[in-house]
Image (cartoon, rainbow, N blue to C red):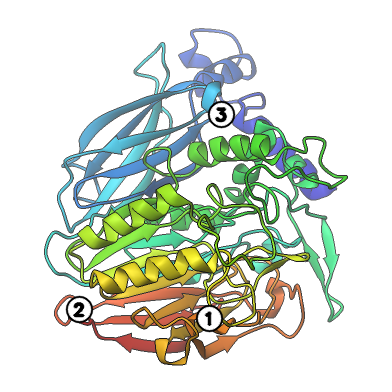
Amino acid sequence: MERRMVLDRRTVLRGGLLTGGGAALGLLCGGGTAAAAAPALLRARPRLTHGVQSGDVTAHEAVVWARSDRPARMIVEIGRRPDLRDARTVRGPLLTPRTDLTGKTLLRGLPSGEQLHYRVRLADPDRHGLLSEPVVGRLRTAPRARADISFVWSGDLAGQGWGINPDFGGYRIFNAMAAADPDFFLCSGDYVYADGLLAETVPLPDGRTWRNVVTPEKTKVAETLAEFRGQFRYNLEDAALRAFNARVPMIYQWDDHEVANNWYPGEILDLPQYTEKRVDVLAARARRAALEYMPVRGDRVYRKLSYGPLLDVFVLDMRSHRDRNGPGTSPAQRAGILGAEQVAWLKRELRASRAVWKVIASDMPLGLVIPDGDAIEGVAQGDGRAPLGREREIADLLSYAKRHRVRNMVWLTADVHYTAAHYYDPGKASFTDFDPFWEFVSGPLNAGGFGPNALDGTFGPQVKFQKTPPRANTSPAEGYQFFGQVEIDGRSAALTVHLRDLDGASLYSVNLNPRR
């Protein structure tokens, strides 16, 4: 109980209800004791509560996020110099309780291909000269010409009962990802576990004890908007994650656990822990919380981010538009895991792309069989023969890409809680009308380790590498946490993928040369 009491007190401090005294504060208030004057003055000074984040960075634009402890105006300064003496100031939105005091400022007209520094302050809405202490960050804009590019990806944070453990270094994998000095972080989904409860202590197989920081929102499944917001605030309690956010922009993608395990539109939950059984209601609240707390531009999960002539990133949404989870055996199914509108968008954007590499950010793997009880949650349904069910949608997409000479697609994903490299070979597939491609899997960030999953042979996936834990729900304390890194050489345009462990050691690497 001690950890929860400490955290609750910090929450009160953020609200300005508990403050320290000082004689100088008493003088500033024009009389009265320091003890009486200090609370009034400090309550009037806004404070940034959860660090800063940037995201959806392009050559000339970026989103910067912050949260206040009370209504305040967000102000961002951005410049090339770390001391920000060359900075320009951008007046951001008024942060109000309507968005849980979060806000995002869109920065325009940025120089391309440069490292920039920014500083966020909050201004009292009535007394504009009364400012918060600043919080600083940095970002790199996308290049306009060929240049070296590096980014990291992973997913799954605070899942299966494994939350922030200060004894373990918190979410320490973010320290290893920061050490890679990436241009951006591609979040592959399950950034929060809105359906994942945390206990204060969990016994480990070797006799040790895992100790979670626990907040009230992590003691039940999220159902209300306030509870979904609390899931995001929980992760931002971690110092390693906040430090990472301040120096590495994010491209955010969601999966199922932002809402509820294995969800699909129209589902009615049959679970006793939920009072609200309608998934569509839960998903709307979860989506609002995600868009409030993540540095995303716009209100659509699927989107394309251009990162110069060498890279386009296509972010998919395999949750919002999918059909019902079922056996996946229909030989005539037209809809699938993406939906007609998203498939049309993806085909159009892939065909129009002039980037050398097309990275498909997929929140689920294509060839791994991922069950949902007696149904199928993913794409592959396990028989390894001609495409059926959701496989038909993917087969159509791959065939379209081949027909229109869409070269150099690489699929990146997480979801299954282990790391692997899969080569999809039409020469070994039941369905052959596609160009060969690679899929790389890496995760979790801080969650239970699982795997491996069975591979379905429909698209001919071959396991080139995989590393899995010794048992289901292996804790982060045993080290089976993973992320991936992509490096693109500015001169040769070669793309190298590294699958890395919790501390950043490379477990597997492969160099891919672009096809012309």
Q: CA distance from mark 1 to mark 3?
A: 46 Å
Crowd around label 1: few <14 · some 14–19 · many ≥20 (10 Å):
many
Q: CA distance from mark 1 to mark 2?
A: 30 Å
Q: Could you tell which of marks 1 and 3 lies nearer the N-terminus?
A: 3
Residue closer to the observer: 12 or 245:
245
User: Which residue is rendered at x = 20% and y = 50% of the image?
Assistant: 81
Residue closer to the observer: 183 or 434:
434
Say above or below: 387 vs 162.
below
Residue closer to the observer: 114 or 333:
333
Res 297 → quadrant:
top left
**Secondary structure beneath disc 3?**
loop
Q: Could you tell which of marks 1 and 2 lies nearer the N-terminus?
A: 1
Q: Quadrant of the C terminus?
A: bottom left
Q: Residue extending furthest top?
A: 31
**Percent position (x, y) of residue 130?**
39, 20
Question: Which label lies toward us, 1 or 3?
Answer: 1
Res 454 → quadrant:
bottom right
Inspect the image, locate mark 1, and give the three-letter code of the amino acid beneath it.
Thr
**Percent position (x, y) of residue 200?**
82, 55
Crowd around label 2: few <14 · some 14–19 · many ≥20 (10 Å):
many
Which residue corresponds to mark 3?
Answer: 100
Q: Are marks 2 and 3 in contact (CB under 8 Å)?
A: no
Q: What label sits on residue 493 in the rendered view?
A: 2
Inspect the image, locate mark 2, and give the three-letter code of the amino acid beneath it.
Ala
Say above or below: 477 vs 338.
below
Which residue corresponds to mark 1?
Answer: 458
Query: Can residue 180 be seen in this snapshot?
Result: no
Q: What label sits on residue 126 in the rendered view?
A: none
Question: Which label lies toward us, 2 or 3?
Answer: 2
Inspect the image, locate mark 3, and give the three-letter code of the amino acid beneath it.
Asp
Q: Could you tell which of marks 2 and 3 lies nearer the N-terminus?
A: 3
